[in-house]
C-alpha cells in the first residue's frame, strides 16, 4: 500500500512546494479535511482523496494562501497605467487592450487594475481584464464583489468613494468596474491553461512563483511568456525578481513596480554578461538610484602585497554567477568577499538576494536586516524583507516596513 504523501500530491496537482508554506501548514490542511470527511487516519483520508471526485479541490482550498488587498504595491498599478496609456495613444480605433491577473484570489487585484486604468483616464471600452484562480471559493467571493475592512489598507482610500457602494458588512464594487473583469477557474499547470487565449498586453502574476520549487517555477514562467505579447509587461512580486532575470526577462526599471519585459529569449543562447551583471545588485532600482549609498561605501581593495588579496572575491563576478543560476557558488563567493573586504550594504544585500532565490528565507531575512542596519534607507532590502515577514505570518512587522518604504518614496524619511 502506498504511504500517504500529501506534499507530493499538492506539488503534482498545483505546483505547491511544501517548503514555501511549511510542512506544518500542509499538515493542518490535511487535518482539517480529515475532520470534514469524518476519517480518523491519514491513510483513510489518502484513500478518500484518491477516490472521491472533488476532494482534491477541497484540499487545494484548504492550503491556498489568500492574503491580499486593494492596490497592494501601488507602484505596480501606476506603472501599468502609464504603460497602457502610451499604448492606447498608438492604438487603432476599436482596439481592446487585454490584461491578465493570475492568481486573482478574491478579486482585489483585477479590480484594482480596472480602477487604476479608469482613474488614469483610459476609455472604459478600450480594455478588458481576465482574472484566473485555482480556488473556487475565492472566485465566488470575487464575483460577489463585497469587501470588508481588511481589503482596504493604507492611508489613501479615496478610490473607495469613487468605485464602491456602502452595503451591510462592507463595500461592494461598482458595476462600472466589475463589468470589465471576467473571472475563470484555472491552474497554470493544466496543459490547456488559457490555450485559446490571445496574448496579453499586461500580465500580473505576483507572489505565485514563490510557492513553487524550481522546476515548477520554470514551467509556470514558460506559460507566462506564452501568454505575454512580445512588447507586453509582466508584473511579479518583489521576491520573484531575480527568478525573472534568470529566465530572460528584462526589468522595466520602474522603482518598486517589479515590472519586466520579455525582450529576449535565453533558451537558445546564454545571456550576455553586460545585460545582467548588475541585476542581483539592484533588480528593482531605477538608473538614478545609487548602488552604493553615501552612508555605506565599499572598502578599497587591499594592496597587492596584502595577504587578503590572494582570494580576490570580486562582487561583479559574484553577480554574474548568481544571474547564471550558480547560487551555491555565488553564496560562497559572497561570504568570502565579506570576510576579505568587510561587511557592506551592497554585499549583504547581494547575499540576501542569493539566499532568497535559493529558498533559504530565514537566512535571507537575516541578511536583509544586516543590510538595513548599515543602510536604513535601502529601499530594495525594505521591500524584500517586508514581503518575507508577511509571508512568514508577521503581518504587523511587515506593515511597519511598508510604512517606512512609503515614507522613503514620499521623501518623508531622511
Image (cartoon, helix red, strand yellow):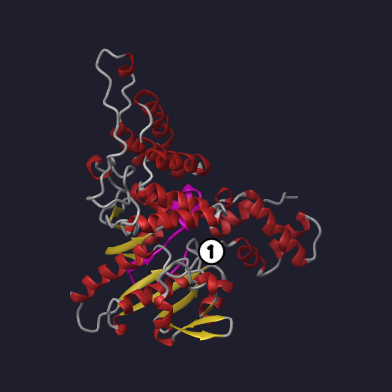
Q: Which one is in front, 203 or 394? A: 394
To which residue does mark 1 refer? Answer: 67
Q: Which residue is pictured at 31% across the width and 53% down the height? A: 249
Q: Please tell me whether residue 158 is drawn above or below residue 202 in the rendered image.
A: below
Q: Position of residue 306 (x, y in %)?
A: 29, 14
Q: Residue furthest right?
A: 40
Quarter of the image for residue 348 reads: top left
Residue 230 visible: no
Q: Is residue 360 magenta?
A: no
Q: In the picture provided, is 57 more to the left or to the right than 304?
A: right
**What x and y, as percent, mark residue 262?**
29, 57
Magenta residues, as a range? 191-217
195 drawn magenta: yes
Measured as percent of width and height from the top left, residue 106 is found at: 52, 72
In the displayed structure, 336 sits above or below 45; it is above
Front position in the image: 26 or 146 = 146
Residue visible at 75% across and 50% down in the picture = 1
Amino acid at each position: 500500500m502506498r504511504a500517504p504523501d500529501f506534499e507530493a500530491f499538492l506539488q503534482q496537482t498545483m505546483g505547491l512546494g511544501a517548503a514555501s508554506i511549511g510542512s506544518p501548514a500542509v499538515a493542518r490542511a490535511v487535518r482539517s479535511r480529515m475532520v470534514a470527511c469524518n476519517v480518523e487516519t491519514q491513510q483513510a483520508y489518502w484513500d478518500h482523496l484518491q477516490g472521491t471526485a472533488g476532494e482534491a479541490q477541497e484540499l487545494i482550498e484548504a492550503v491556498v494562501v489568500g492574503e491580499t488587498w486593494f492596490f497592494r504595491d501601488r507602484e505596480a498599478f501606476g506603472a501599468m497605467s502609464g504603460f497602457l496609456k502610451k499604448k492606447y495613444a498608438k492604438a487603432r480605433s476599436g482596439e481592446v487592450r487585454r490584461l491578465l491577473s493570475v492568481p486573482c484570489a478574491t478579486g482585489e487585484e483585477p479590480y484594482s487594475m480596472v480602477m487604476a486604468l479608469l482613474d488614469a483616464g483610459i476609455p472604459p471600452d478600450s480594455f478588458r481584464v481576465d482574472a484566473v484562480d485555482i480556488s473556487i471559493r475565492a472566485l465566488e467571493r470575487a464575483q460577489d464583489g463585497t469587501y470588508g475592512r481588511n481589503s482596504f489598507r493604507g492611508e489613501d482610500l479615496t478610490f473607495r468613494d469613487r468605485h464602491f457602494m456602502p452595503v451591510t458588512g462592507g463595500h461592494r464594487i461598482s458595476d462600472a468596474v466589475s463589468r470589465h473583469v471576467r473571472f475563470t477557474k484555472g491552474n497554470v499547470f493544466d496543459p490547456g491553461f488559457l490555450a485559446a487565449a490571445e496574448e496579453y498586453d499586461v500580465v500580473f502574476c505576483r507572489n505565485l512563483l514563490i510557492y513553487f520549487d524550481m522546476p515548477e517555477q520554470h514551467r509556470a514562467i514558460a506559460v507566462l511568456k506564452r501568454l505575454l505579447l512580445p512588447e507586453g509587461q509582466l508584473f511579479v512580486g518583489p521576491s520573484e525578481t531575480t527568478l525573472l532575470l534568470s529566465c530572460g526577462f528584462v526589468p522595466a526599471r520602474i522603482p518598486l513596480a517589479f515590472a519586466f519585459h520579455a525582450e529576449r529569449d535565453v533558451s537558445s543562447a546564454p545571456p550576455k554578461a553586460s545585460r545582467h551583471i548588475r541585476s542581483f545588485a539592484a533588480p528593482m532600482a531605477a538608473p538614478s538610484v545609487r548602488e552604493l549609498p553615501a552612508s555605506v561605501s565599499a572598502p578599497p581593495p587591499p594592496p597587492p602585497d596584502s595577504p587578503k588579496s590572494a582570494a580576490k572575491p570580486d562582487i561583479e563576478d559574484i553577480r554574474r554567477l548568481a544571474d547564471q543560476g550558480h547560487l551555491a557558488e555565488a553564496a560562497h563567493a559572497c561570504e568570502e568577499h565579506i570576510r576579505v573586504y568587510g561587511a557592506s550594504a551592497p554585499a549583504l544585500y547581494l547575499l540576501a538576494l542569493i539566499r532568497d532565490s535559493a529558498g533559504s528565507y530565514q537566512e535571507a531575512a537575516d541578511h536583509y536586516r544586516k543590510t538595513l542596519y548599515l543602510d536604513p534607507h535601502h529601499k530594495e532590502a525594505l521591500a524584500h524583507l517586508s514581503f518575507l515577514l508577511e509571508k512568514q505570518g508577521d503581518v504587523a512587522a511587515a506593515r511597519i516596513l511598508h510604512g517606512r518604504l512609503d515614507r522613503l518614496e514620499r521623501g518623508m524619511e531622511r
